[in-house]
Structure formats: C-alpha cells, structure tokens
Image (cartoon, rainbow, N blue to C red):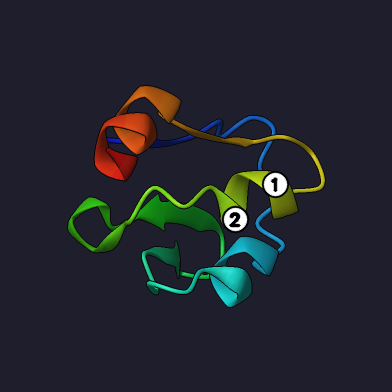
C-alpha cells in the first residue's frame, strides 16, 4: 500500500478526504481513515494537506509512476 496513515496522529478531521482527486480516502464510521489503495494515484496531495503529518505517501512508487 502506498499510503500510510498513523492512527495515533490522525485527528479524523476528514480534510484529506475532501482534497483527494481520486476519492481514494474514506472515513470509516467517521473516525478511522481508510486508504483505498487501488484508487490512489500517489499524487501526495493528502500528505501535504494533513495538518498533523499523519499521512505518508510512498515517494518511491510515485517516482516510478512518473517515469
């Protein structure tokens, strides 16, 4: 999976869900952030948007995709 969410840091604010152009993030029961890997394009928007740094996108996969 290319998107990792730190459940301890995540505040479940949902901001990342709103900015994801691929709709690859979901809030499960309004509290647990769940990445939908098959929809993720590794763009990194969610990672940059997260106010607490709870999201990490595998940049190696992103670089391979850009080639």
Labels 2 & 1 near each other (Cβ < 8 A): yes
Picture layout, residue 21 above or below residue 35 = below
Where is residue 42? Give x, y as percent: 39, 47
Q: Residue at x 64, y 30 (%)?
A: 8
**Residue farthest along the top direction in this orientation:** 60
For mark 1, give the secondary structure. helix
Where is residue 19? Give x, y as percent: 61, 71
**Residue farthest along the right direction in this orientation:** 51
> Which of the numbered marks, if any, corresponds to residue 48?
1
Q: Residue at x 44, y 28 (%)?
A: 59
Where is residue 24? Give x, y as percent: 36, 65
Please tell me in which quadrant of the rendered image residue 63 appears.
Answer: top left
Q: Residue at x 27, y 38 (%)?
A: 67
- Give the camera-side residue of 19 and 54: 19
Residue beneath disc 2: 45
**Would you say 12 lies left or right of 51 here?**
left
> Which of the numbered marks, if any, corresponds to residue 15?
none
Where is residue 2? Give x, y as percent: 32, 36
**Residue farthest along the left direction in this orientation:** 38
Q: Residue at x 43, y 67 (%)?
A: 26
**Would you say 11 lies left or right of 60 here?**
right
- Give the camera-side residue of 8 and 55: 55
């Amino acid at each position: 999976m290319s998107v990792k969410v730190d459940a301890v840091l995540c505040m479940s604010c949902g901001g990342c869900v709103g900015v994801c152009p691929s709709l690859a993030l979901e809030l499960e029961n309004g509290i647990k952030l769940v990445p939908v890997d098959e929809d993720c394009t590794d763009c990194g928007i969610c990672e940059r948007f997260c106010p607490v740094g709870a999201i990490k996108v595998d940049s190696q996969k992103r670089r391979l995709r850009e080639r």
